[in-house]
Amino acid sequence: MQYSVSHYSFYKAIQKGEIAPEDCLSKAKELGFDAIEAVDFVTFANREGDLLSQAAKWKKAAEKLGLPFSSLAVGSDFLNGSDGNLEQEIQKVKNWVDVAAVLGAPRMRHDVTAGYARNSGKFRSYQSLLPRLADACREVTEYAAQKGVSTMTENHGLFSQDSQRVEALYNQVDHPNFGLLCDMGNFLCADENPALAAARVAPYTRYVHAKDFIVKPFDSAAPGEGCFQSRAGNYLRGTIVGHGNVPVKQCLSILKAAGFDGTIAIEFEGLEPVADALRIGLANLKRYWSEV
């Protein structure tokens, strides 16, 4: 088992000027993580110069610490991205595959789409869009296989967030280099039971995000700043792994029973101080895994 941390976990601290993006690597090592996950808009926020040159610098810094990159996470949208030009959007994602290869990341996660806006007059069901989305994912993963990088999509972005939807996409892509990233907390954004959803996607899972949320129902008092709403309007706030309503230990038990023994990355997006949140979350995560 490898325990990683998403660079995104430090994002709020970076924005506040509490830590520099490049210092997150040494902090992750200090906290006891085995690896770090690169994220396009965090790791590569400084777009000066060539992305591949930046990736080479990041890899050198990580190697100096003995902290490999476990994955690269990038945004993409095979409906709306690149002004609707599918060929250009696919090429953009392939360019990120090249970045992952330079980083030495064995895998890369990309989004598939946020869907059409419901009031756009173009809205279509997920099922009807599957052929287009799957063909794009397959073209990307075929390219990535040549680079030694496996690709994944995540239950993320509300439209492509349900376990049934990402399972259907996985089966439609039908390529050995393509799998799923199971984010156990993100199922709540689609108002799914995380344990039941994890059980559905466990056989296809290649990588895991450990994430926790505090949940308040729609009909309770709005909690205000720091929260956002799920698809059905319930209130979610990110928190330390083990402190919220996500059945983290149960999800781990399900994944282990399905044979998963890969990398689990903490993706923290709460209000607590990041160093404390990651230290406590990692200790909880290791204990839960050892107990299931």
Image (spheres, rainbow, N blue to C red):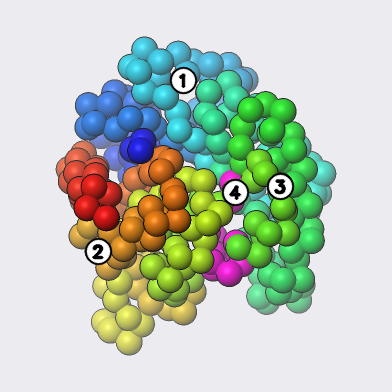
Residue underneath mark 3: 175
242 sits left or right of 118 in the view = left
Kindly identify the residue that appears in the image at 54 percent across and 31 percent down. 106
Of labels 3 and 1, earlier in sequence is 1
Tag 3: amino acid? His
The disc placed on residue 244 is: 2
**How much space separates mark 3 and mark 1, taking CA atoms?**
30 Å
Tag 1: amino acid? Trp
- Say which quarter of the image contains residue 145: top right
**How much space separates mark 3 and mark 4, taking CA atoms?**
8 Å
Of labels 2 and 1, earlier in sequence is 1
Res. 83 in view: no
Question: Residue 51, how many percent across, how many down?
Answer: 60, 24
The disc placed on residue 249 is: none
Q: Secondary structure beneath disc 4?
A: strand
Residues at circles 2 and 1 in contact by the CB criterion of under 8 Å:
no
**How much space separates mark 2 and mark 3, taking CA atoms?**
35 Å
Tag 4: amino acid? Gly
Query: What is the span of residues highlighted in magenta in the rendered image?
Result: 152-166
Which residue ends up furthest to the bottom in the rendered image?
219
Residue 265 belongs to magenta span? no
**How much space separates mark 2 and mark 1, taking CA atoms?**
33 Å
Question: Residue 17, how many percent across, how many down?
Answer: 29, 34
Depicted 66 relative to depicted 159: above or below = above
Of labels 2 and 3, earlier in sequence is 3
Residue underneath mark 4: 179
Q: Quadrant of the N terminus?
A: top left
Tag 2: amino acid? Gly
Residues at circles 4 and 1 in contact by the CB criterion of under 8 Å:
no
Instruction: Please state which of the two labelled residues, at mark 3 or mark 1, is closer to the viewer.
Output: 3
198 sits left or right of 279 in the view = right
